[in-house]
Image: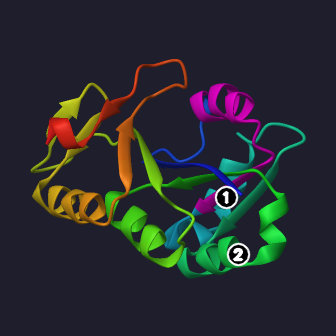
Amino acid sequence: MIKLTRIDDRLLHGQVAFTWLPALGADCILIANDKVAKDEFMKMTIGLAKPAGTKLLIKSLADAATFLNDEKSKNLKVLLLINSVKDALAMAEAVAEIKSINFGGLRTKEGAKLISKAIAVNDDDIVIIKELLGNRIELEIRQVPTDSRQTVEGLI
């Protein structure tokens, strides 16, 4: 069962490991990212941020979708981490269970504008956000679980 789907360009870091995991009661972190899935050094580095007793899976987008759609994964309480709006759309289209996406952190990049203190999106991201909203996916911004929810729709 997916407890939270989160877009965060840093993927796994202290804020995620020590605030979100306990708040969600998650026992599995699934990173869905094609680049990281092929990079042994990045996998090792990310593994260092994993809290003890938590399962960490790093899979390509396609393999992550297959895993999440498999009945065997339903016993796990999964925190799904994605690092881009584009990848969030791919996962939402492939996994029917995804009904809500948390925007946790997207650093500024060329052509991007801040819509909150930690979320910067460009025109391509906005097109994808509108598509996600059109597919009735709830999009909210919170850096930590105790933050008040902000809807992305009201900020773009």
Q: Identify residue for label 2.
A: 67
Give the secondary structure at mark 2: helix
Residue 64 versus residue 141 in the image, above or below: below
Residue at figure coordinates x 84%, y 73% from the top left: 72
Residue at figure coordinates x 27%, y 57% from the top left: 133
> Horizontally, is 101 left or right of 114 in the view?
right
Q: Identify residue for label 1.
A: 30
- Pointer 1: residues within 10 angstroms few (<14), some, or many (20+)? many
**Image position, residue 70 (x, y; %):** 74, 78
Report which quarter residue 50 is drawn in.
Answer: top right
Residue 108 can be seen in this image: no
Report which quarter residue 107 is drawn in.
Answer: top left
Could you tell me the amino acid type at mark 1?
Leu
Give the secondary structure at mark 1: strand
- Pointer 2: residues within 10 angstroms few (<14), some, or many (20+)? some
Q: Nearer the viewer, residue 74 or 82?
A: 74
**Image position, residue 117 (x, y; %):** 27, 25
Disc 2 vs disc 1: Cβ atoms closer than 8 Å?
A: yes
Quadrant, the C terminus: top left
Quadrant, the N terminus: bottom right
Residue 126 versus residue 95 in the image, above or below: above
Would you say residue 25 sits in the magenta stretch?
yes
